[in-house]
Image (cartoon, rainbow, N blue to C red):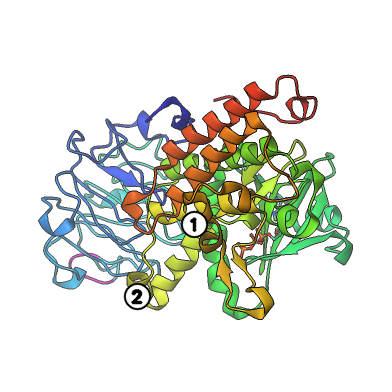
Amino acid sequence: MDSESVESIEMWNYGSFDAFSFSLAVDNEIRSGTSSNLGASSPLHSFASLLDIAIRSRTSSNWETSSANSYAFGLDNAIRSRTSSNLETSSAYSFAFGVDTAIRSRTSSNWETSSTHSFAFEEDRTPSNLGSFRVPSFSSGVDYVIRSSSGGTDSETSPVHSFAFAAGASQMAANVTGHVAKGLQLFSREELVAATNNFSLHNKIGVGSFGVVYGGLLVDGREVAIKRNETSPKMKEFQEIVFGYLVTFLGRLHHEQLVGLVGFCEEEDEKLLVYEYMKNGSLYDHLHHKGSVELNSWKMRIKIALDASRGIKYLHYYAGTNIYRDIKSSNILLDDTWTARVSDFGLSSLMKAVGTIIDPEYYGQYVMTAKSEVYAFGVVLLELLTGKRHILCGEDGGTPLSVVEFAVPPILDGDLAKILDPRVGAPHVNEAKAVELMAFTAIHCVNLEGKDRPSLAEIVVNLKRALAIICDSSTHDSISNHTIFDVSE
Ligand SMILES: Nc1ncnc2c1ncn2[C@@H]1O[C@H](COP(=O)(O)OP(=O)(O)OP(=O)(O)O)[C@@H](O)[C@H]1O
């Protein structure tokens, strides 16, 4: 990976203990004592489950062909071992827990009566009987607590020889306090009521899939955006999963081009997520509702595209390749310096994860890949170039047209001027090359076949070049050099 992609995220302290096994996080990263990668170079003996239910071991990316002696559970609650997809009939000596928190072993479906040699955690996190078991390995709980036969409840002090951690997000939410991503603040409901003037209509700034979004002012003077869960029972499961996932995992991701999660509040049925406030709202609103003058510059539009691509690229490398973002102009927010930042990362894939539990068919039919993200980002680039929405109403009430259908043919015909947003105007001679580069990047992103689309790294490189061209050409230009903030690598 190039230098752009090596911005750090916090790890799970595994470095301080000599695990022979590894953990795989919801971010799809696999880690061991000696490696952050499951690949052949890692001396792993155990494995963990993936959000996608695949099970992998040291020598294989597939459980069936693996020589692992342990196993993990899937989001679907099924328990699998090397020789079986069902624990009861399995010869596994280890076990896993299910999203239902039931604990099962080789000989029993109940921990208390089990003669298993391995163990799992208990929902109440009491490791009471742990010491009396001869467990050579263990599994962590949805609460991130790691336990071993001779250790306590803390991975730092535990002489564990193997471990795993699961992504049972809905239960994470239940026991989240104390196990959240470092740095996240726990708010009381009272504090957030005060910050939003009791969730007044006046403070309402939007509505999304998680619920209503309020602008708020914390007592320390920080402006925040607060997402409050809807109370309908239908939404409950989704929200619990999203909530647990965000506060335990996504809260660890930090990048200048992501909208940061500041903290959360969980009291009774109320779940609130507190984000950094993006003063200038969404790119979608500026392009399609407000027609803001700040965006009437090609330099600004290329800069926004570059910022967003960097955020997505970071997520792509650090949030895992099977967690797909909901890339659209309404999820690209602009802060007070007009720097674009990606929000809602991971939410759309989580909705599909919930879909997996409810309807496995859904998963099979709606396969997203990294290249789907690239396509979606190509659509955002075309929106920036044309000022048109993703779907355009047909002329005189005719058939609706996608921005891809609208823009790609003229770009390919060398008639870029025909589709450029007239609000920005024709690019100056020196700007034309940069806009052209962005346009060609966009049409490659929306290529029909994923294999023909560029990688996120390539997109970032192109947009960087486009910005450099335009900056060079406008050193004498009074507008933009002062208003655009480039984020250093
Ligand atoms: N951190 C934030 N700062 C400022 N405004 C925000 C912030 N987060 C969200 N908003 C505003 O609230 C609106 C709703 O946001 P939210 O992320 O909940 O849903 P969405 O992205 O529009 O839809 P979906 O959840 O379906 O993707 C956004 O369009 C934006 O205008």
From the viewer's perspective, tell me whether residue 460 is left or right of residue 215. Answer: left
Element assignment for label 2: helix
Which residue is depicted at the point 27% across and 59% down?
Answer: 54
Which residue is depicted at the point 28% across and 46% down?
Answer: 149
Element assignment for label 1: helix
From the viewer's perspective, tell me whether residue 267 is left or right of residue 376. Answer: right
The stretch in magenta equals 105-109
Q: Amino acid at mark 2?
A: Pro
Mark 2 or mark 1, earlier in chain? 2
| Residue 353 quadrant | bottom left
Is residue 138 in view? yes
Residue 266 location in percent, x, y? Answer: 66, 59
Q: Amino acid at mark 1?
A: Pro
Which residue corresponds to mark 1?
409
Disc ID at residue 360: 2
The chief SS type of the magenta part is loop
Q: Nearer the viewer, residue 391 or 173?
A: 391
Given this view, does label 2 or label 1 mark the residue nearer the observer? 1
Q: How many marks?
A: 2
Indicate the quadrant containing the C terminus: top left, top right, bottom left or bottom right. Answer: top right
From the viewer's perspective, tell me whether residue 27 is left or right of residue 273. Answer: left
Q: Is residue 107 within the magenta segment?
A: yes
Q: Nearer the viewer, residue 195 or 428?
A: 428
Q: Is residue 182 above or below residue 275?
A: above
Distance Cα–Cα, label 2 vs label 1: 38 Å
